[in-house]
Amino acid sequence: MIVAMTADSTPDNVEEVKRRIEAHGLVAAVSQGVERAVVGVLGSIPPDLKDEMELLPGVMQVVVVSKPYKLASREFHPDPTTIQIGEATVGGPQPVVMAGPCSVEDEEQMVSTAKAVKAAGATVLRGGAFKPRTSPYSFRGMGLDGLKLLDLAKQETGLPIITEVMSPVDVDTVAQYADILQVGARNMQNYNLLDEVGQTRKPVMVKRGLAASYEEWLLAAEYVMSHGNEQVMLCERGIRGFEQFTRFTMDVAAIPVIQRLSHLPIVADPSHSTGKWYLVTPVALAAVAAGAHGLLIEVHPNPDIAKCDGPQSLTFDNFNLLMSQVHALESIRNHPVPA
């Protein structure tokens, strides 16, 4: 249920609505929009609560939301959410490019890549310290040492860091280094992990699972938001289909669909979705044209010897070419998609 306040409602009016909601053992979540406040009601709604809320001073309308996700819905938060990450605004008019290697390997690789992607226009540095791999024999990351190298690259360039956290027990450690906590596709429904990152108050990126519906994906974001963390962004990284030529199938339609269903920013990952470096640029441009708020791009100084995902990584020169084309699209795309 959502309680929409009038434009001239007072803070006392909003407080009274919260008090009445909490008196029923429910949770009241207030969203302050540009024109008016909206109060979301979380929990099992008693049948007479709607009538009770409509009689309170300052209440304009009470809407029963049929969607299972409430906090992530457009009904609860009509205005788009923006998240400030260093000098970048995720959810703003310009797409934010997050770039770097799939896995942190050594100091030279990490620092040289950070400097190269910053020079090309990226505003967030990506890099994996903890890596979920299909095979237990594949390189699974450097762990804490990898986090320290990411921090070193941040000190050298000033770029904020996005990196994946895989386990609830690692959340506090990763949060000491990362500016954005990434929940990977294979952990999208790891509810203990979602609970834990929701309590950090750090920005969180929730990647879409390999076979997740839009609703399941938004409910994963809801887990994070239900703990009071409103700094959530989504990432479309491709879903599993029958075609084997590409690594996954990039669902470009997810970008405008999510913008219609939710106020949360959405980022695209053309590297993991395609699995081939020469497909990254065209799919990235398609995502930007569709209205993506950002891109997550894998870049490596020498992809041929990368310990992880070399075939889908761009060289420094190819990343420069991608960035020049992204900038060309910024001025002509229709953004944001009307709700």
Image: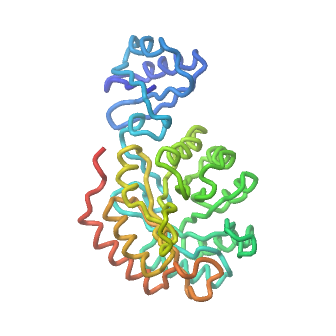
Residue plotted at (62% across, 49% down): 189
Give above or below for 117 relative to 262.
Answer: below
The image quadrant where one finds the N terminus is top left
Q: Quadrant of residue 270?
A: bottom left
Give above or below for 90 relative to 260.
Answer: below
Residue sitting farthest toward the front: 242
Seen in the image, is 329 located left or right of residue 311?
A: left
Residue plotted at (65% across, 81% down): 307
- Residue 230 or 287: which is nearer the viewer? 287
- Residue 11 or 62: which is nearer the viewer? 62
Could you tell me residue 242's position as x and y percent?
49, 65
Residue plotted at (42% across, 57% down): 89
Residue sitting farthest toward the left: 332
Seen in the image, is 189 located left or right of residue 117?
A: right
Could you tell me residue 237's position as x and y percent?
49, 63
Picture colour scheme: rainbow
Seen in the image, is 249 located left or right of residue 33?
A: right
The image quadrant where one finds the C terminus is top left
Could you tell me residue 107's position as x and y percent?
67, 81
Seen in the image, is 225 located left or right of residue 197?
A: left
- Residue 215 or 55: which is nearer the viewer? 215
Residue plotted at (47% across, 41% down): 72
Give above or below for 97 relative to 20.
Answer: below
